Image: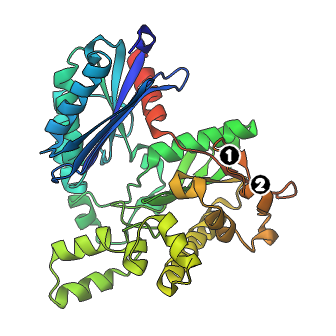
Amino acid sequence: MSDDTAGSVLVLNSGSSSIKFQLIQPDTGESIASGLIERIGEPDGHIVYRHRTGVEERHGVIADHRAGLKTVLEVVAEVGRPLGEAGIVAVGHRLVHGGKVFYEPTIIDDDVVRAISDLSSLAPLHNPANVIGIEVAREVLPDVPHVGVFDTAFFHTLPAAASTYAIDRSIAQQYDIRRYGFHGTSHQYVSSCAAQFLGRDTSELDQIVLHLGNGASASAIHGGRAVDTSMGFTPLEGLVMGTRSGDIDPGVLLHLYRQGLTVDRIDDLLNRQSGLRGLSGVNDFRSLRTLVGEGNADAALAYDVYVHRLRKYIGAYLVELGGADVITFTGGVGENNVDVRRDSLAGLERLGIIVDDTRNSSESRSPRRISSDDSEVKILVVPTNEELAIARAAVDLVGS
């Protein structure tokens, strides 16, 4: 690493079985280096580190998050120099669940770590891993401020009608049950980029953002503030996803439990064995489209169910907003799949929504418009960059 790393932010995303990191220049948006540690706790662990002069990879057992993060920091030091000498001004941590406690970027201290850990019951797959990432990073970089940016924060503003489940109020209060929403950093970043692309202020726009990846969520944004989103108490609610069911009648869960399935088995079914995987056997959208092209009936049905659910949310948010100024696709599927964009908005011409097939087929990786010139509603594709959003939030807080 050269001296131009000065002023950079290390962004960490410590997930349930992987850790991603990037070293970013917030001003320019340049990614100086990035890394991925995956298959933690499995015999075929994998570490990849990308930097300006090449790629470093390692394979082998990665016992746990602590071992994985320490190993990748060793790799960084070997090919560049220790992070402690890299001119890092802050470490930004992507944190999944802030509960009712955290809804703004927050300087992390011991009390904050304990509070995040206490929220683990709301995100048992993510918050414990987030805490480990924080602890290791604070050990390695003890003299640099650490900032938590919460996935739920953008949806803290949801109106009560949108955030409240219709269950007994005392039960909901006792167990902190409400609709929290997720992917908030992406929805906020993309909606801001969409406004910038259109030369408008976010306060002037009604927006629908569709974050479509292996996890998927939709949001309705009025004047820069989220008023509804598809994910709820957990990231399981809402759209059909790679391995998650999305919306399902709660009576199905009771029925399965009464048939002898354990709570853990039902949890695994809905979170890891449902969605596209449950319907077609694959969760990667590219594999799904290949199967559809080969005439696989299960894959064709999975695709139809996926688009049907997506159209329902688009329609609901058009009503909730009283119409939209812009609809934006983002995420791996949203940015790259021509068919999903076309089919999810097909037949909506009477609502002022018209996709231009030529623009939609463009392979550009830049923010772009895919609506026709006579479409009243602008339709955009905007690549998300949660890491950059976290880096900038961290710098803004540290410098304030």
- Which of these two is toward me, 191 or 268? 268
Say which element carries label 2: helix
Which residue is outermost to the right? 374
At horizontal 54% and vertical 81% (from top left) the residue drawn is 300
Which residue is outermost to the bottom? 259
Say which element carries label 1: loop
The image shows residue 239, relative to residue 191, as above or below, that is below
- Which of these two is toward me, 6 or 291? 291
Q: Which residue is mark 1?
A: 364
At horizontal 61% and vertical 66% (from top left) the residue drawn is 340
Q: Amino acid at mark 1?
A: Ser
Q: Earlier in the sequence, mark 2 or mark 1?
A: 2
Q: What is the quadrant of the N terminus in the image?
A: top left
The Cα–Cα distance between marks 2 and 1, rounded to whole angstroms, is: 10 Å
Mark 1 surroundings within 10 Å by alpha-carbon count, few (fewer than 14), some (14 through 19), many (20 or more): few
Which picture quadrant has residue 142?
top left
At horizontal 41% and vertical 55% (from top left) the residue drawn is 181
Query: Can residue 134 be spotted in the picture?
Result: no
Tell whether 154 sits left or right of 252.
Answer: right
**Image location (x, y in percent) of residue 144:** 28, 17
Q: Are marks 2 and 1 in contact (CB under 8 Å)?
A: no
At horizontal 78% and vertical 62% (from top left) the residue drawn is 357
Which picture quadrant has residue 271?
bottom left
The image shows residue 165, relative to residue 218, as above or below, that is below
Q: Which residue is mark 2?
A: 359
